[in-house]
Image: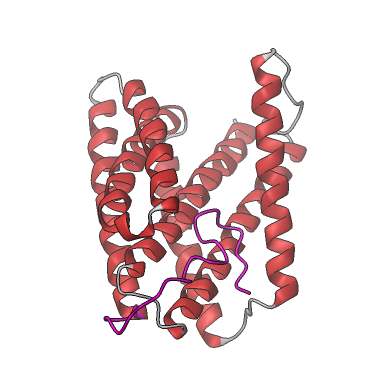
């Protein structure tokens, strides 16, 4: 069974009959991923520029987050629609990322570019390590990353619920050593999810999944990249806040 902690790349994701049609390829998936990343970067930069010019981009952040979440759910249940819903998701997430990047940038100049660079560097480094065999997605590796990711998701959900009642978990979101250590842990787990995504996509290609699954696999990888960028942004803000 193919296990991944990415919520949109389930164990049965590639369990789709092909009926002799064109099959999913690694090159095609890479191309689709590049398209989604370009769409995300375009709306991110546009929103960021508007914010730097004094435009209130908070509606963009809220709208992008809500629409992106809805599109992610639709895509997860309808993989065949991923070419359209995945592209719309990328555009919506770009609005959200552009808005929050501008907010962080206003307080910590240079942080957005640093976070983007770290995200790209992490992606490239893990891809090289995976292709060279330095990192292997063994069953124990998958189980460990899955458990850690689920734990983080549960922790965030509990924090959100407690926040509704005015209760905040101490230290974790602060710039102290505990807060920085927690962010480092989350960034590492988010990065390791990329390894699981690489492995899952490779297995899908080997299984001869239908061609449209390239879009779905690219969408799943983008979900992980967005999460990784946000967590790196949080980590860098804590480090810069501690210096100040």
- Residue 180 visible in the shown view: no
Image colouring: secondary structure
Q: Position of residue 122 (x, y in %)?
A: 51, 63
Quadrant of residue 145 in the image? Answer: bottom right
Left or right of 158: which side holds 125? left
Q: Position of residue 78 (x, y in %)?
A: 38, 54
Q: Nearer the viewer, residue 20 or 181?
A: 20
Left or right of 227: which side holds 106? left
Residue drawn at (54%, 47%), measured in percent from left and top? 232
Q: Is residue 70 above or below residue 131?
A: above
Magenta range is 1-25
Residue drawn at (28%, 27%), measured in percent from left and top? 51
Q: Position of residue 169 (x, y in %)?
A: 75, 26
- Residue 9 visible in the shown view: yes
Q: How many numbered marks have been drawn onto this rendered protein structure?
A: 0
Q: Position of residue 233 (x, y in %)?
A: 51, 42
Q: Is residue 229 above or below residue 165?
A: below
Left or right of 152: which side holds 28? left
Q: Quadrant of the N terminus?
A: bottom right
Residue drawn at (43%, 38%), measured in percent from left and top? 69
* Magenta run includes residue 175: no
Magenta stretch secondary structure, dominant: loop
Q: Nearer the viewer, residue 116 or 18?
A: 18
Quadrant of residue 62 in the image? Answer: top left
Q: Nearer the viewer, residue 122 or 18?
A: 18
Q: Quadrant of the C terminus?
A: top right
* Magenta run includes residue 23: yes
Residue drawn at (54%, 66%), measured in percent from left and top? 12
């Amino acid at each position: 069974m193919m296990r991944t902690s990415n919520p949109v790349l389930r164990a049965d994701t590639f369990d789709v009959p092909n009926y002799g049609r064109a099959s999913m390829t690694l090159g095609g998936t890479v191309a689709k991923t590049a398209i989604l990343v370009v769409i995300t970067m375009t709306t991110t930069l546009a929103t960021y520029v508007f914010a730097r010019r004094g435009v209130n981009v908070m509606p963009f952040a809220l709208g992008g987050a809500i629409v992106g979440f809805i599109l992610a759910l639709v895509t997860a249940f309808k993989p065949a629609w991923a070419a359209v819903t995945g592209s719309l998701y990328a555009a919506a997430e770009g609005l959200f990322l552009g808005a929050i990047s501008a907010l962080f940038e206003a307080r910590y100049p240079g942080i957005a570019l640093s976070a983007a660079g770290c995200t790209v560097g992490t992606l490239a480094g893990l891809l090289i390590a995976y292709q060279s065999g330095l990192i292997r997605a063994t069953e124990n590796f998958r189980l460990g990353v899955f458990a850690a990711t689920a734990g983080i998701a549960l922790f965030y959900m509990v924090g959100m619920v407690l926040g509704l009642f005015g209760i905040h978990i101490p230290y974790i979101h602060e710039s102290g050593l505990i807060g920085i250590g927690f962010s480092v842990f989350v960034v590492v787990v988010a990065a390791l999810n990329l390894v699981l995504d690489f492995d899952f996509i490779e297995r899908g290609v080997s299984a001869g999944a239908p061609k449209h699954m390239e879009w779905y696999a690219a969408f799943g990888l983008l979900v992980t990249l967005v999460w990784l960028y946000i967590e790196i942004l949080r980590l860098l803000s804590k480090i810069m806040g501690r210096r100040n």
